[in-house]
């Protein structure tokens, strides 16, 4: 039978990363291609205790249908944490729980964009969200970045050329680049949003994972007009398998996201929401996060040393102050795809940079390396192998 | 600030049922308006034991990222159960795990329909899925039903008038009508799908809850061409709060649904998938279902007796052989909305039938009553109050 699929899915390909991850299920391959939290980052004992308590104390509530907006005590706890960071303002914001950060982006896009509307995003950016936007047949416009984040001049140029309706950014420890948007740049981006009347979707799954430098306030803290949608997630600080994230925005926006969520999955897994609630309110969650920061500081340190000791000095590498990723760039003209294929042949997997560009044919010689998932030994060995390869390629 | 939301959400209103449910949080109201499993239907002890075992034996797998297709052992277990019913054929089908049955319908719609394409559905039908379809701006065409299910002649008439791309049906104990599509009608519907080349989305969340009569094979059992998408759910047989459902269809269709799911929520909560897997493979799941059928047989019996003893004989009421709902119809010309409002004034909530019609302005004098959620006492008392009201309205 010949199927007539929708235009929406015909243009979509399975995520390059997830396809690569399937290949790297080979246990002999050292994978720098994932984005998983380190196994020792999970608060396993706490989750065991909390889950047992919930199922003993209140099993029906944990198993029955719940409301689309999310488990009310979790929403309140999220509001408190976000208020501490200046992100949530009780006078002008509301919060909805989502099925991971991914759903926050998808529902924000669905709420605002018609087919053909322009969505701008950093390029490179997180392929999962780029694909979510593509699945709504929007005009996806990539804006290049520098070390301070998205290039404000290029963003303004794009805004003058066409009506940008929504801008997607990951200001903290961006996926895939690891870059952190400077405070000056955040202010410039917000001013452009006001001047050219677009909405900012600020995706912040990694903000809690800063292991060096000083916190920079979210763009949402600047927002007096209700034009910033702030999306967060418990995937990187509690468990990605639980699929619990959240969105903080103006109530009018939240009510549209709730309507879209209602038809998407009714509500998020309620036991997982209850676990997150207890973990962040009845345990010392800040100590837990401090522990995670320590794990990733150490792991990044091993990778950074491995890069320094082994890579050709013709490779440019970002130096993230948090998050999970390093972004390496080969000199212009290098066959990056060939490089990544040869790396896999030598049993190290990285993600080719074109998986992350707004347009698949944007030229790039970069690739993404993850330091949270490999073991310490794999980090060392993988950098030796990749380093050898860079020297063979580049001299 | 004036928001420019997408056309998709501007037409969408929050689900009438969920809004009514919010009102009925008043503990003094007897709610026949919900669709929740009975609290004593949950396998609480088994879930406690399984959850504890999983978190002791394999916590990292239960907390880490997983694959979009779903937990592989659960997919295999679902395939085995569906093969037993003739629904899954290993030669031509595949299975993906979804975040509840709702997501199965949403992703099927997204995979096949462009804006303006025609989707036909029984009218009345499940408001959650109708709203999912509306959120893709499709042309939603309602087809009336009789006691054997969707009217095949009206369906053929619609198929001649315009190109139907997808037909949504709930053959077993339909929500809201409680009706079961006859075997002859299932065959007729499948033949129409072949003749007029449309896809059938067969939604079967209630099929396991038959408490009278004989099982009727799914439409999917007739499918030699790969044009039936079969959607099931653990919401009504294990726990709706877990949000675990599944889709069985041709591999080409499953691969598109997987791509759409990837951008929607990456994957479904993995602990919940592992719990479902152990519950259906390591426990006597069929005995559990037999117990549920007993609960609902008894509860329906109480409501049926209450209707018989109290309702005006001018009210027509369906006599479901399974599921959770009874559909009551007042004589033509009755002010059904006024009736439902007066019922709430007297502390009994039912759902007005126009919440379920394909077009909001379709005339209807019906309302939906649920017998799974109320206590036995509430079933009796609610029927007395509603019955008194029917006699006042209709004599």
Image (tube, coloured by chain):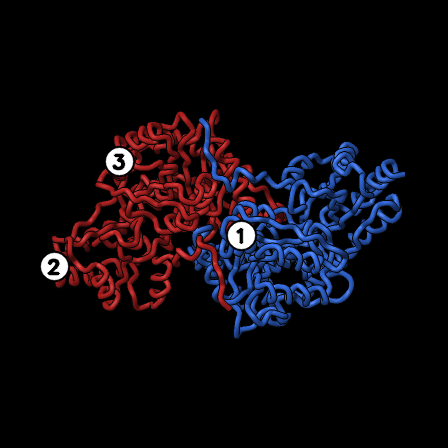
Chain colours: A red, B blue
Q: Chain of mark 3?
A: A
Quadrant the C terminus of chain A occupies = bottom left
Question: SS class of the residue under badge 1?
Answer: loop
Give the labeled residue for mark 2: A394
| Residue that extends furthest to the front in the rendered view of this protein | B161
| Callout 3–callout 2 Cβ contact below 8 Å | no
Residue A248, position as x, y percentages in the image: 45, 35
- Residue A328 versus residue A84 in the image, above or below: below
- Residue A53 seen in the figure: no
Which of label 3 and label 2 is nearer to you? Answer: 3
Disc 2 and disc 1: Cα gap in Å? 54 Å
| Callout 2–callout 1 Cβ contact below 8 Å | no
For residue A157, the mark is: 3
Q: Is residue B211 left or right of residue A385?
A: right
Which of label 1 and label 3 is nearer to you? Answer: 1
Of residues A127 and B284, the one nearer the viewer is: A127
Give the labeled residue for mark 1: B117
Disc 3 and disc 2: Cα gap in Å? 35 Å
- Residue B178 seen in the figure: yes
Q: Residue at x 61, y 68 (%)?
A: B87
For residue A173, the mark is: none
Q: Residue at x 24, y 35 (%)?
A: A153
Question: SS class of the residue under badge 3?
Answer: helix
Question: SS class of the residue under badge 2?
Answer: helix
- Residue A164 versus residue B295 in the image, above or below: above
Residue B330, position as x, y percentages in the image: 81, 43
Residue B208, position as x, y percentages in the image: 68, 61
Q: Residue at x 72, y 67 (%)?
A: B184
Which of the two discs, 3 and 2, labels the residue nearer the N terminus?
A: 3
């Amino acid at each position: 039978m010949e199927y007539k699929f929708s235009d929406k899915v015909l243009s979509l390909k399975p995520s390059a990363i997830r396809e690569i991850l399937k290949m790297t299920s080979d246990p002999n391959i050292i994978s720098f291609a994932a984005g998983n939290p380190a196994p020792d980052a999970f608060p396993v004992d706490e989750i065991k205790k909390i889950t047992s308590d919930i199922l003993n104390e209140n099993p029906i509530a944990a198993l029955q249908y719940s409301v689309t907006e999310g488990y009310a005590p979790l929403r309140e706890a999220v509001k408190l944490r976000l208020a501490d960071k200046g992100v949530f303002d009780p006078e002008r914001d509301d919060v909805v729980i989502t099925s991971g950060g991914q759903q926050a982006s998808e529902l924000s896009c669905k709420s605002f964009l018609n087919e053909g509307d322009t969505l701008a995003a950093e390029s490179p950016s997180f392929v999962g969200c780029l694909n979510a936007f593509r699945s709504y047949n929007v005009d996806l416009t990539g804006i290049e970045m520098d070390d301070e984040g998205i290039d404000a001049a290029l963003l303004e140029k794009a805004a003058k050329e066409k009506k940008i309706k929504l801008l997607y950014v990951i200001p903290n420890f961006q996926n895939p680049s690891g870059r952190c948007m400077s405070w000056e740049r955040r202010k410039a981006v917000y001013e452009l949003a006001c001047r050219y009347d677009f909405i900012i979707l600020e995706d912040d799954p990694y903000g809690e994972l800063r292991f060096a430098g000083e916190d920079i306030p979210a763009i949402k803290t600047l927002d007096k007009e209700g034009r910033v949608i702030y999306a967060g997630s418990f995937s990187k600080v509690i468990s990605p398998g639980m699929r619990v994230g959240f969105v903080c925005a103006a109530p009018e926006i939240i009510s549209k996201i709730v309507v879209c969520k209602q038809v998407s999955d009714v509500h998020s897994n309620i036991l997982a929401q209850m676990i997150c609630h207890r973990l962040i309110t009845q345990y010392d969650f800040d100590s837990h996060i401090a522990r995670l920061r320590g794990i990733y500081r150490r792991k990044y340190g091993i990778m950074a040393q491995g890069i320094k000791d082994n890579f050709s000095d013709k490779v440019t590498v970002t130096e993230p102050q948090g998050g999970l990723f390093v972004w390496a760039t080969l000199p212009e003209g290098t066959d990056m795809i060939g490089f990544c294929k040869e790396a896999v042949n030598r049993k190290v997997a990285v993600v080719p940079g074109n998986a992350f560009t707004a347009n698949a044919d944007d030229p790039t010689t970069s690739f993404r390396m993850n330091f949270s998932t490999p073991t310490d030994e794999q980090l060392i060995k993988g950098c030796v192998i990749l380093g050898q390869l860079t020297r063979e390629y580049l001299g």
